[in-house]
Amino acid sequence: MSKKTIATAHAPNAIGTYSQAVIAGGFVYVSGQIGLDPLSMRLVDGGIEAQAHCVFRNLRAIAEAAGSSLAQAVRVTIYLLDLDQFGRVNEIMAEYFPQPYPSRATVEVSRLPREAELEVDAILLADSA
């Protein structure tokens, strides 16, 4: 099985030894995204709501660069600093992902890169057709 890496200027550059996404075996594996503005590479201002919108826009940009879409998501994992924010993040996610929603796990963590309040990764079907 071959793999292809995905990179787009419409999402933040990787801040470590990873790719924005990898296509393999008919799936797109999107690396965890935090609320970094793709141009400035700085965490967006405005707290968890602004970060959540930024995260889902970044995920969408990577999905589209891979020839897929968030509608093709089969699995999403959300990492939150504060599980009390689950409801608001859930509402924001619904603005970006159409039904039927992907399977999902949400985990409270003690710390995230760049002091972000959430991180989200995803697995998508590789073909948006």
Image: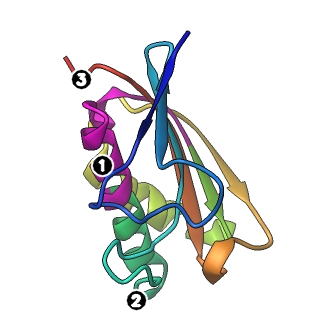
Q: Which residues are magenta?
A: 57-76
The kind of secondary structure element at disc 3 is loop
Contact flag, marks 3 and 2 (Cβ < 8 Å): no
Q: Quadrant of residue 64?
A: top left
Alpha-carbon span between mark 1 and mark 2 = 20 Å
* SS category of the residue bearing label 1: helix
Above or below, comparing residue 111 to residue 97 in the picture? below
Q: Amino acid at mark 2?
A: Gly
What residue did someone put label 3 on?
Answer: 128
At numbered mark 2, what does the secondary structure look like: helix, strand or loop? loop
As shown in the figure, which amino acid type bears the numbered disc 1?
Answer: Arg
Give neighbour class at mark 3: few <14, some 14-19, many 20+ (Cα, 10 Å).
Answer: some
Magenta span: predominant SS is helix
Name, please, the residue furthest toward the bottom.
Answer: 45
Residue at 40 percent of width and 89 percent of height: 46
Circle 2 residues within 10 Å: few <14, some 14–19, many ≥20: few
Q: Where does the image place residue 7, in percent across and percent down from the top left?
A: 37, 48
Badge number at residue 46: 2
From the viewer's side, name the closer residue of 96 and 31: 31
Pick whichever, 62 or 56, lies toward us.
62
For marks 1 and 3, give the CA distance.
12 Å
Whether residue 50 is situated above or below residue 9 in the rendered picture: below
Q: Position of residue 74 (x, y in %)?
A: 46, 26
Q: Position of residue 32 (x, y in %)?
A: 56, 53
Question: Which quadrant, please, contains the N terminus?
Answer: top right
